[in-house]
Image: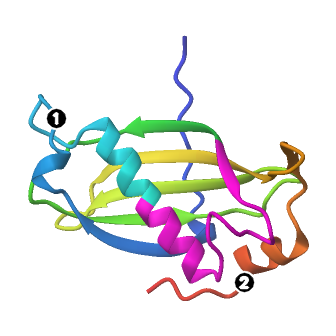
Amino acid sequence: MERVRLEFPEDAIVHRQPLSVRITDMNYGHHLGHDAVISLMHEARATALAHCGMSEGDMGGYPCVAADLAVQYQAEARWPDQLVVETAIPVPGRRVIAVFHRIRRAQDGQPVATARVNLMLVDPEAGRSVAVPEVVRAALQGDVDVA
């Protein structure tokens, strides 16, 4: 099976989050583990959404859930590497918000991992996904400082 490379949408970056590899993030191979990568991206995503004036629990009145996740690894990171997690959010689809993350080592800029998580907004009472509200689209596509 041919591997499809995730293309990180540079023009859709909404936030950059500095983080570091903690000793507890190391796996048996003595590098950043998969579970830690997911946690670091989750923290960066929560911060990026807050930067856009939202939270995972309230995006236009609805909570979001991860519908799927794809992660591709490019390099290793080890304790105590400093990292930068870039979060990019292209224009949302009707029912899905694609959020891309790229983790880079701060010291050399080398990409460690690139990921895409598709978020869906849900009506908890109905137990169904809902269309992405215009207020969410506007917040995600606003003029955001990426410093």
> Residue 73, position in %: x, y?
35, 38
Q: Is residue 38 magenta?
A: no
Q: Which residues are magenta?
A: 43-66
Quarter residue 50 falls in? bottom right
Depth check, front residue: 82 or 131:
131
Q: How many marks?
A: 2
On the question of residue 78 being in view, the answer is: no
Across and down, in percent, residue 111 comes to 33, 52
Which quadrant is the N terminus positioned in?
top right
Q: Do the residues bearing badges 1 and 2 touch, measured as CB atoms within 8 Å?
A: no
Q: Nearer the viewer, residue 17 or 90?
A: 17
Residue that appears at 85% across and 61% down: 132
Q: Residue at x 10, y 51 (%)?
A: 23
Q: Amino acid at mark 2?
A: Gly
CA distance separating discs 1 and 2: 38 Å
Quadrant in which the C terminus is drawn: bottom left
Residue 141 position (above or below residue 87): below
Q: Amino acid at mark 1?
A: Asn
- The quarter holding residue 137 reads bottom right
Res. 142 mark? 2
In the shown orientation, is residue 31 left or right of residue 34?
Answer: left
Colour style of the rendered protein structure: rainbow
In the displayed image of the protein, which residue is found farthest to the front?
125
Looking at the image, which is closer to me, 58 or 30?
58
For numbered disc 2, what is the local secondary structure?
Answer: loop
**Is residue 123 in view?**
yes
Q: Where is mark 1, residue-wise?
A: 27
Name the spot of residue 86 as percent of width and height, x first.
Answer: 45, 65
| Residue 141 lies in quadrant | bottom right
Q: Residue at x 25, y 38 (%)?
A: 33
| Residue found at the far top of this picture | 1
